[in-house]
Structure formats: C-alpha cells, structure tokens
Image: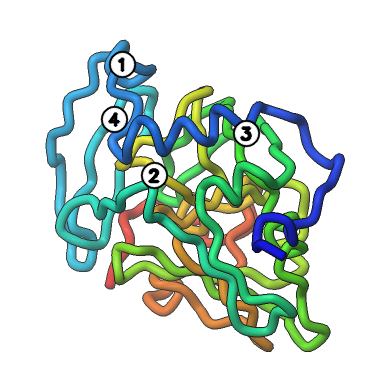
C-alpha cells in the first residue's frame, strides 16, 4: 500500500480545489510573480535589523516580513517534504501532492503580530493541522508538537489540544494563490487565534512529544501560549 493510499479521507473543511495546491509545484517556490503582490507594487527594502532578527521588510497590504536568518530559504517544490515523527503511529514524509490529497480547507482570518501591526481578513487555504495529525495517527502519550522550519533555525510549539482546533491550518495558499517564498512557501502554519510568531514559515517538520518544547522566540522571553489579546501585551520588537 502506498503512503498516499494510507492518508485518511474526511469531509471536514471547505473544498478549495486540489489543482490550486498542486500549482505550487508547477510555479516553483517563488510562485505568484503576477499575483496580488505585484499588483500592489511591492518593493522589498530592508527597513531595520535587530539582534537575532535578520530583517524586517515592509510589504504590501500591511505585512512585515520577518526572518531570523540571512535571507529567505528556498526548496524545490517537487522535492519538498513535511515530516511527521515522534509519538505517531505512522511516521510520514508528505509531499505537496500528499497534502493536496488530504481534505482541503479555506479560512479568512486576521493576522496579528505581537509587535502591534495587523492585517485584516486574510484568506488562506490548505489542510487543517488536525487532519495532518490524523493521517499519521497520534500516540496516546503525545501531548505537544514541536514544529521546525527548513531555514535551519526557527522552531515553534503547540499543545496537542491547541493543534486540534479548527483554526490551525497547514497553509499552502494565500489570497487564492500559492504562497510566495517570503510568506513561507511552500508550506507554513497559520495559528489563527495566536500572535504571528506561532505561525511558523517554511515548515518542514512536526514532531509529537510528551511535553511542550518552547520555540525560537519563546526561549527569548515570549509567551508559549500566544493568544491574541491575552499574551505578551508588548508593542516592541523581539529582544534577544
């Protein structure tokens, strides 16, 4: 039996079309050169730097682009894999095609940064995180997730209870088109009810663990539970 045939089907979520997800492979990592961002005249100019924060770049629509490494990591979409490991029944290595075969969901949510800026009503689509976890099967001893990025530096965490919510999305598209590399292509997390640092970009790994392992900014003083309006209450840039 192939890995794809083992992925569980479900009627949950709002269908968005498999071809949109598979378009990531055809377009490549840079993706939507003629999409929303060019139409708004984006110019990527480094505006500020801070210790541990390689760049803060203004972008159209109110977004600021944060990285903790020098530049944007890239991966061949055809070679991309999202691994599920740790306390799972079936360790998986999911391609973009595998993700497209899982139930697709779309949601429109505000994106709120802990530093104070906000973008309203951003449409995302992809696979609910809980559907990805269901595909691997969650061991009864699992209580948390450690999430990794292929930038080689950034990590994030969630409790299993948080991960099973219906507003946690493994996102592959934004504004109806494949993610751009600066927004985390080809796959990122959208933790909609939490501040943006929880929504890890360039996500390539999900490890199920017994307890929460604080993520990149959390070991530098940020709250592990980052509920919008209830955590941090700060408007400054992250401080190492």
CA distance for labels 3 and 4: 18 Å
| Residue 154 versus residue 13 in the image, above or below | below
Given residues 144 and 194, the one toward you in this image is 144
Quickly name the residue at label 3. 109
Q: Residues within 10 Å of mark 4 (few under 14, many from 20)?
A: some
Quickly name the residue at label 2. 185
CA distance for labels 3 and 1: 23 Å
Q: Residues within 10 Å of mark 2 (few under 14, many from 20)?
A: many
| Left or right for 114, reference 10 | left
Q: Which SS class for mark 1?
A: loop
Quickly name the residue at label 1. 34
Q: Residues within 10 Å of mark 3 (few under 14, many from 20)?
A: some
Q: Give residue 118's position: percent from left, percent from top.
A: 47, 35
Q: Earlier in the sequence, mark 2 or mark 4?
A: 4
The residue located at (73%, 56%) in the rendering is: 5
Q: Earlier in the sequence, mark 4 or mark 1?
A: 1
Q: Which SS class for mark 2?
A: loop
């Amino acid at each position: 039996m192939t890995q794809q045939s083992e992925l569980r089907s479900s009627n949950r979520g709002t269908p968005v079309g498999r071809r949109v997800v598979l378009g990531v492979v055809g377009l490549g990592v840079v993706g939507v050169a003629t999409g929303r961002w060019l139409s708004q005249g984006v110019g990527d100019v480094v505006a500020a730097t801070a210790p541990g924060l390689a760049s803060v770049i203004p972008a159209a629509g109110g977004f600021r682009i944060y990285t903790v490494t020098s530049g944007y990591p890239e991966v061949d979409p055809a070679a991309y894999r999202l691994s599920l490991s740790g306390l799972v029944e079936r360790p998986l290595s999911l391609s973009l095609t595998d993700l497209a075969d899982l139930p697709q969901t779309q949601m429109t949510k505000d994106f709120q940064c802990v530093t104070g800026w906000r973008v309203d009503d951003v449409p995302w689509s992809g696979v609910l995180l809980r559907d990805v976890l269901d595909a691997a099967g969650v061991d009864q001893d699992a209580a948390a997730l450690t999430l990794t990025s292929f930038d080689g530096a950034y990590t994030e965490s969630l409790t299993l209870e948080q991960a099973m919510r219906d507003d946690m999305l493994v996102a592959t598209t934004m504004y109806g088109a494949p993610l751009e590399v600066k927004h985390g292509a080809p796959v990122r997390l959208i933790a909609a009810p939490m501040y943006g640092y929880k929504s890890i970009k360039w996500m390539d790994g999900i490890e199920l663990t017994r307890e929460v392992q604080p993520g990149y900014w959390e070991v530098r003083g940020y709250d592990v539970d980052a509920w919008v309006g209830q955590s941090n209450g700060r408007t400054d840039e992250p401080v190492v």
